[in-house]
Amino acid sequence: MPPFLTVALIGSLLIVPTANNDAPCPQWKEEIGGCVVNNGTEIIIDGSHDTEQNPGTSPINNDWQPPLDDSWTPPPTPEEELDECLREWDSYIRCYEASKEVEGEEAEEEARAIPAATITDLARFAPAGSTVTGEPENVGVAGLPTNFVTTASAETVTGELFGFPVSVRFTPSAYDFSFGDGDTVTTTSAGTTWSDLGQAQFTPTDTSHTYRERGTYTARADVRYTAEVDFGIGWFPISGEVTSTGAAQEVRIFEAHTALVAHTCAQAPASPGC
């Protein structure tokens, strides 16, 4: 049998292979448990330490608690991560909506920086007045309708207002006919010729007028316009109407007399009424 062997790790482990030996056990070996007798197939591992150990900071059981100072923050649980994600998402939405509100406020502030225009401010941009025509050829017969027609259409003009470039759009809304004998009429129609209406001459229309006496009359058609303005931020309607005064037009009204004759004026120029 091999001789007795002892290996000692000071301050750590002591591994003592033992053998069945009848020799007396020295005192030092008894103190370390080296004289244990076995059948030669066992290894006894024992150890001790003579310095204070550092337990470390890792938990060693379920009762471990983190330190109470601010130096350590526990990792978030999956539920906390989800809540944080939702909070960040909600904050993002609020920030996005707030940015939109700021943009809207800036646009509104920009709009407020432009003084509010009135229909009076736009009067100088109004289209020039149109000329009225009395059918047929500015000649009429007393006691019979004379048909009046004028022209007007939507127009857009540009210029500067309050120091800002501006576009003004005028749209005809009404027509004030003045016939020169004290009578007037307001319509939403500019008038239509007898031909376009398919009517015979000297028949009444929406814009016709019947003079009672012969003479020369000054007729006129004033056009009323509604207005919209654009300072570069979109079209805005303006309350009220602006009126463009029409040009004066002379209309000659004759008397018509009938007589029973045997011949036409071409055939007998000296006949009554010729």
Image (spheres, rainbow, N blue to C red):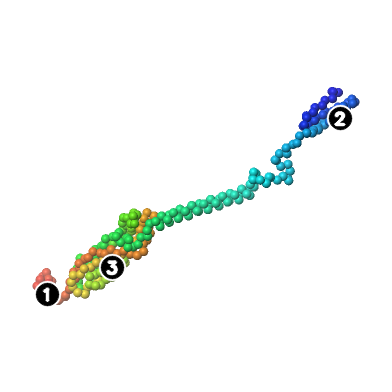
Residue denoted by label 3: 176
Residue matched to label 2: 30
The quarter of the rendered structure image containing the C terminus is bottom left
Q: Quadrant of the N terminus?
A: top right
Above or below residue 195? Residue 65 is above
Residue at (55, 51) in percent of width and height:
91
Give the amino acid type for the residue marked by disc 1 in the picture: Pro
x 64%, y 47%: residue: 77
Picture quadrant of residue 247:
bottom left
Helix, strand or loop for disc 3: strand
Location of residue 17 by image quarter: top right
Viewer-nearest residue: 212 or 144: 212
Residue depicted at x 32% and y 55%: 160
Residue at 29% x, 66% y is 175
Quarter of image, res 186? bottom left
The percent coordinates of residue 125 (x first, y second) are 30, 59
Q: Which residue position is annotated with label 1?
A: 272
